[in-house]
Image (tube, rainbow, N blue to C red):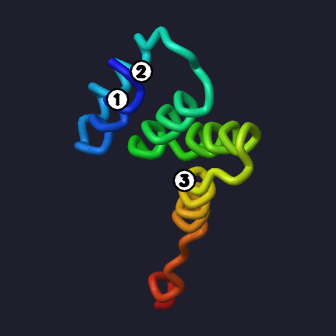
Amino acid sequence: MDLMEIQGLLDKGRIDEAESFLDSFDGEKGLVFLLVKANIDFSKQFWGEAINGYNKVLEINPCNKEATSRLAIIDSILNFRNEGMFNV
């Protein structure tokens, strides 16, 4: 199974299946591999691992829009505060 097929499984919500195929992937582990891995971590809400993965993608290609936007989403999630929730 190639990386685009694995990403397709992930897009369909078949996260564990995508991760299993990625773990057994024996092709080139370059930019696309790192991006799919980070996307799996993102889907599993493993924020630290996803951040590290997207940062590796950006080291290779600083203009990667998917990595940049996913990092912004993670930042928004981790910095979310509901101020009204704590006003009693």
Residue 36: percent from left, percent from top: 47, 35
Residues marked 3 and 1 touching at CB (< 8 Å): no
Name which residue lies at 59% across and 50% down: 67
Q: Closer to the N terminus: mark 3 or mark 1?
A: 1
Q: Amino acid at mark 3?
A: Glu
Mark 2 and 1 residues: CB-CB less than 8 Å, in contact?
A: yes
- Residue sitting at 31 percent across and 35 percent down? 15
Q: Which residue is mark 2?
A: 22
Residue under the point 41% across and 21% down:
22
Q: Amino acid at mark 2?
A: Leu
Q: Which mark is residue 6?
A: 1
Residue 50 position (above or below residue 67)? above
Q: Nearer the viewer, residue 88 or 22?
A: 22
Q: Quadrant of residue 13?
A: top left
Residue 68 badge: none
Amino acid tagged 1: Ile
Q: Is the residue 1 above or below the residue 44 in the image?
A: above
Can you say whether 42 is above or below 68 in the image? above
- Residue 83 location in percent, x, y? 53, 85
Which residue is denoted by mark 3 in the rendering? 66
Q: Quadrant of the N terminus?
A: top left
Of the two numbered discs 3 and 2 in the rendering, the one whose residue sits closer to the viewer: 3
Q: Does the residue at mark 3 contact the one at mark 2 (Cβ under 8 Å)?
A: no
Estimate the x, y position of residue 47 in percent, counting from the top left: 54, 46
Q: Earlier in the sequence, mark 2 or mark 1?
A: 1
What secondary structure is found at the residue carrying circle 2? helix
Q: CA distance from mark 3 to mark 2?
A: 19 Å
Residue 3 as seen in the image, left or right of residue 75: left
